[in-house]
Amino acid sequence: MRRPAPTSRSSELTVVQHIEELRLRLLVSLAVFGVALGLCFWQNHLLLQIVDAPLQGKRPVTFGVTEPFTATLTVAAYAAFALSLPVLLYQLYAYVLPAFTSAERRLIGPLLVMIPALFLAGVSFGYFIVLPAALHFLLHFNADQFNLQIRASDWYTFFGMSVLACGLIFQVPVGILAATRLGITTPQALRAKRRHAIALCALVAAMLPGVDPMTMLIEMAPLVALYELSIVLAAALPAPRALAESA
């Protein structure tokens, strides 16, 4: 299999060459994800202990012959995605890099480093803050009226969606910084639209996993904080015009 072309190339490619490069980078991404999935499935007992820790001693139950395997595979797949994310981002970056100017490349590089770091911070926030608060509310809501059993497939899906959603919402600074650096918006415009942004944060928090008001407020707080932090960072960085002139 031919190696993907270097990311620093400047020559124009034909449509067939673009498709071939895309195919190769997809194969590399799938191979990396496959290796990560195999590693995570091999250590599934450790992963299940980590995922079940927020349940505080409760053991999920299964209702089918195949559910123990499929539930374990689901947990391994979520972990494999998080583990292979840096490589997946690099493959995407390397594929689209020739389409950008040198100034835009200088912009994308630091943002690419921020994405995994912010994703890890979001996953940690979801695991240590959001999930305990959500479980405390949901598992104790009308607890005397129900014989509560936690199904493994439901719990692992809820867990994966919650932590991944938190990892994604922590990418707000990346999107805002990219928009300001590319001249799409300005810090002044972001400050002027703060009320609209807060309303949008509330809407996004309501759409995230976790239906209780407490979880929604906990998920909304970092969104607003990240929005304000993005404005501060955007104002501290040089203006796009100055960046282009320096390039």
Image: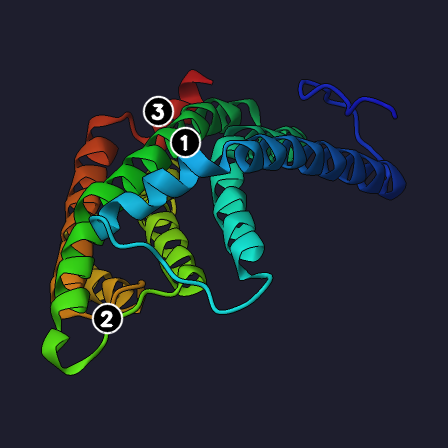
| Residue in the picture at 15% in, 45% down | 225
For label 1, the SS is helix
Q: Nearer the viewer, mark 1 or mark 2?
A: 2
Q: Nearer the viewer, mark 3 or mark 2?
A: 2
Residue 10 sits in quarter:
top right
Residue underneath mark 1: 116
Residue closest to the eye, 97 or 119:
119
Q: Residues within 10 Å of mark 1 (few under 14, many from 20)?
A: some
Residue underneath mark 3: 242
Query: Which amino acid, by three-letter code, is at mark 3?
Result: Ala
Are the residues at dot 1 and dot 2 in contact (C-beta closer than 8 Å)? no
Residue 7 sits in quarter:
top right
Which comes before the other along the chain, label 3 or label 2? 2
Q: Which mark is residue 211?
A: 2
Residue closest to the eye, 111 or 60:
60
Which comes before the other along the chain, label 1 or label 2? 1
